[in-house]
Image (cartoon, rainbow, N blue to C red):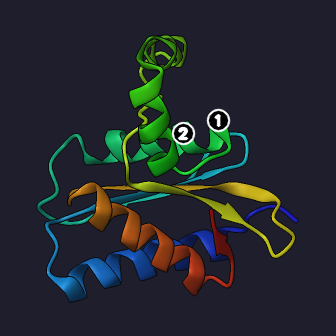
């Protein structure tokens, strides 16, 4: 079953709620479907103009490569030329930086990805994972 708009909205709501609760800087959260197409995006008041683009690039990289952006960040360190080529091929949409996770169903099927931008990579990833879990799905 594909990722629903209700699940998407729950992911974003929970991610931004955790960010506010922890006092993180203003965030943007973006959810993409399994084909890398936008399901929904929100940018908190005060978040800079690049936040949605960065969150999208993190999520796009995750869903394109079938791995969390934390894993991609590590791989990029080992293969910088390859990841540079991926970024060029993705026409700027591919950002292998910590702050995005896959969204999986209970069977492990990838439904999409969620990316965040505004805090540290760890903070971004933390709110993404919380959002996915709150929707009854599995972060990956």
Instruction: Measuring from the top left, give residue 37's x and y in whole percent.
Output: 63, 41
Examine the rendered structure and indicate whether residue 7 appears above or below residue 119: below
Instruction: Measuring from the top left, give residue 81's x and y in whole percent.
Output: 44, 11
The residue located at (53%, 18%) in the rendering is 86
The residue located at (57%, 74%) in the rendering is 132
Left or right, 49 with reference to 2: left
| Circle 2 crowding by C-alpha within 10 Å: few under 14, some 14–19, many from 20 | many
Secondary structure type for disc 1: helix
| Residue tagged 1 | 64
The N terminus sits in image quarter: bottom right
For the residues bearing labels 1 and 2, Cβ distance under 8 angstroms: yes
Res. 60 mark = 2
* Residue 76 is at least partly visible in this image: yes
Cα–Cα gap, marks 1 and 2 = 6 Å
Examine the rendered structure and indicate whether residue 41 appears above or below residue 24: above
The residue located at (23%, 89%) in the rendering is 21
């Amino acid at each position: 079953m594909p990722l629903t708009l209700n699940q998407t909205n729950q992911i974003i709501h929970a991610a931004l709620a955790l960010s506010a609760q922890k006092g993180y800087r203003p965030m943007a959260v973006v959810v993409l479907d399994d084909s890398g197409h936008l399901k929904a995006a929100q940018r908190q008041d005060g978040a800079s103009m690049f936040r949605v683009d960065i969150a999208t690039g993190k999520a796009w990289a995750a869903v394109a490569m079938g791995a969390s952006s934390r894993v991609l960040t590590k791989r990029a360190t080992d293969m910088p030329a390859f990841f540079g080529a991926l970024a060029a091929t993705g026409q700027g949409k591919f950002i292998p930086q910590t702050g995005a996770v896959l969204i999986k169903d209970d069977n492990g099927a990838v439904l999409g990805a969620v990316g965040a931008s505004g805090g540290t990579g760890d903070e971004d990833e933390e709110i993404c994972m919380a959002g996915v879990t709150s929707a009854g799905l599995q972060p990956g």
